[in-house]
Every structure is written in structure tokens, then in C-alpha cells.
Image (cartoon, rainbow, N blue to C red):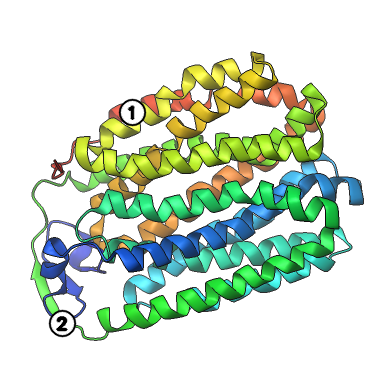
Amino acid sequence: MNKPVIVSEQTLTAPVVVPDAAPGLAAKAAVAAPAYVVLAGISFSHFLNDTMQSLIASVYPILKDAYALDYAQIGMITLAFQFTASLLQPLVGHFTDKKAQPFSLAAGMGFTFFGLLLLSVAQQYPVILVAAALVGLGSAVFHPESARIARLASGGRYGMAQSVFQLGGSFGTSMGPVLAALIVVPFGQPSIAWFSSIAFLAIVILWRIGVWYKPQIGAKKTVVLERDPNLPDTRRVRIALLVLVALLFSKQLYVSSLSSYYIFYLIDKFQVSTQAAQLYLFIFLAANAAGAFFGGPLGDRFGRKYVIWFSILGALPFTLALPYAGLAGSAVLTVFIGLIISSATSSIIVFAQELMPHRFGMISGVFFGVAFGIGGLGAAVLGKLADHTSIAFVYHLCSFLPALGLLAIFLPKLNQPVLR
């Protein structure tokens, strides 16, 4: 299901030609046990990648004070990072659908390496934007092909594999504020350069994974597959993909609002220190990581559509209550919000991959890139709005975002094998 397919006559109803991997690979994947070492390696690499990425948002208070930035400029940093990732991820996925690149992951991590070094010495706002864009470029190369590797190593347990992969990224994102509080705040902006050693470690691991991956794509053959009769027609597939993008957008925009501005919200409303606010952000992001891990296996067992329904709409009561809560109540609410809202990520992505299995890399790029990038664009808009109103008003507005989960009613029912 994760191999590229060339669709003839621009229709899904005709037979398709698949450049398959090694002979019998597709059949073996359905019965083989998950390659846990590979899953652990790609998840740990995701952890390292997103730890470095989350440093950008975590050092916003330092950059804001050092360079007298307003909220709109902070949002533009988020946009610079998200824009390069969102613009290039579908293109990278489309390219690797045609020709897989086993060592592209290690090469892409090099952009993150140089982006961190540049951010540590940046003294001007445009240089900060370029550094953020370089880190986003590394993300653009990393995500589509690493998601393909996770699926290849899944042994048919696609939701579980996607959750393990997402767990690394989510936990890495949660570590950024902690590392910023322990290292960057006391030692200043130059200490960001120390994290380039994490990028080097990731390059080594991803190179080894590339060595494992290369034989899987070394031999190719042509097979003829019939379209799965249980899949919805092309029109319903397009509608479902639009709905999934909208759901992921609402989720990511809310998460981006917390990741980018929650620190400022806590400082403004409760007068806590920057380090304390970063620890509160860690609580939310850690809950977000846990929810991402459990969502995939639950989708494998009970059905992805049900998990999507629960995840998006289930967070709504807690997001609506957050603007009215005290400091301790906010911490508790963000735990529930993180656990519930992030559980949909794996199910949304796997659902989309199953709708268009012949465009696996491109679909992964769209959902990791465009949908997340739209969330980054929304974060920039929210920053501008916060400048003209207040950060508290932004959180009142964002509390209604999970209501977009009602769009899940338009998702088709797929005959998904349910694990017991």
C-alpha cells in the first residue's frame, strides 16, 4: 500500500502499474511482524528532529526581548518555518513516489544542522527568518520518506506504526521548552548551537536506516492491480481528503496557537516567569505526545473514523473552558486537550493514505506539510490579531476550533480490517 502507482487514463477504476519493491515484498509485508528496530530508529530520529524544531518556538521570549519583536513578527518566524516545510513536503513526496531516496533523510537533516547554527549567531531579524526556514526545509525532506519507512516496517499494523512514528515527534516537540528553560534561557541565544550535535546524531541514525531501506527498493517489477472495489468513488475520495485536511488544520491551528503563544498567555494573565511558562507548555506538549501514541492503535482496533470523531469533538468542552480557568486549572485542562486532540493525528493520516494508496508519498507530504503549514499561517494571523486585540481574546477565539470536527460526518466508511 505504500508503493507508488502510475494510474492510467487518469482514473482509479482502471488497472494500475506499480513499481514494486523486492519480489514478494508486498505479500510479505501483510504477514511479517513489525520491524521494531527500524520503527524505534525512525521514531527516535523523529524525536531528535522535532526537538530541534521546537526550540524555535521555545526561544520566542528570548528573541522578542532581545530584538524588540511584536507578536506579528513572532508569527512570521513561525510562518517562515512552516512555509518551507509545507511548500516542499508534497513536492518531496511526489518525487519519492516516483523514485525513493533512501539517504535523503540524512541529507535533509543537514539543513536543520545549519539552520540551528545560523539561529545561534543571528543578530538581525531577516537572518532569524532564514534560519527558521532552513530548519523547516530539513523537516520538508524528513517527513514524507520517514513516514513511508514507518509504514514499510509496520507489518500491516499501520495505525500502530504511525503512532510510534508520531510519538517520537510529539515527545520531541514537548522537550523543546524544557531544554530551552534549562539551557537557552540561562546561557543565551549562542547556546542554541549546542543542539547541532543532536542534528549530527540524527544524521548518523538516518544514514543507518537508509542502509536498511535501500535493499527494499533495489529490485523492481511490474504488477497489475485492480482497484479495491470497497474504496469510494473518485468524487467521494476528493471530498474525504478535503474534510481530512480541514480536520487536521483545525487541530494543528489550535496546537500552534498554544505552542506559539501559550507562554505569552501565561505570562500576561498570571505573571509567571518565562521558565515557569515553558514548563507549563511542556505539560501540554507531553500530553500531546501521549495522545498521539494511543490514537493509532485505537484506530486499528475500533476504526479510524470513530477515533477522529472522538478526538476533535471530544476536546471541545475543555478548549471552551480554558480561557476561564486559573493557572492550575489551565494546566489540568491542557493535559486533557493534548491527550484528546492529538489522538486523531495518526488516524487522519492513515485514513488519507488508505484513500489514495498509489500516491503515498504525496499524501504524506500534503498532510505533514500543507495542513501543518496552514496551521503555521494561521499562527501568523493570530499573532497579528493579538497585536490589535489581546492574547486572551485569541484564546477565546481558538477555543471554538475543535467544533470543525463536525465535518467528520462527511467521511466515507472504509472496510478497515479491525485488530482484536
Q: State the quadrant of the C terminus.
A: top left
Choose between 393 and 326: the one closer to the eye. 326
Please state the horizontal and vertical placement of residue 328, each as a whole percent of the image.
65, 21
For residue 213, above or below residue 389: below
Choose between 185 and 59: the one closer to the eye. 185
Query: Residue at 54% across / 76% down in the picture?
Result: 203
Query: Residue at 36% across / 40% down in the picture?
Result: 294
Mark found first going from the N terminus, 2 or 1: 2
Please state the horizontal and vertical placement of residue 262, each as a whole percent of the image.
69, 34
Amino acid type, label 1: Trp
Residue matched to label 1: 309
Q: Residue at the front extreme?
A: 182
Label 2 to label 1: alpha-carbon separation:
40 Å
Amino acid type, label 2: Lys
How packed mark 1 is, by other alpha carbons closer than 10 Å (few <14, some 14-19, many 20 or more), is some
- State the mark number for residue 221: 2
Query: Residue at 21% across / 86% down in the picture?
Result: 219
Q: Secondary structure at mark 2?
A: loop
Please state the horizontal and vertical placement of residue 290, each as a whole percent of the image.
45, 41
For residue 37, above or below residue 300: below
> Is residue 278 rendered to the left or right of residue 419?
right
Occupied quadrant, residue 233: top left
> Is there any visible trace of residue 217 in the rendered image?
no
Q: Secondary structure at mark 1?
A: helix
Choose between 248 and 205: the one closer to the eye. 205
> Is residue 390 rendered to the left or right of residue 291?
right
Query: Residue at 37% across / 83% down in the picture?
Result: 211
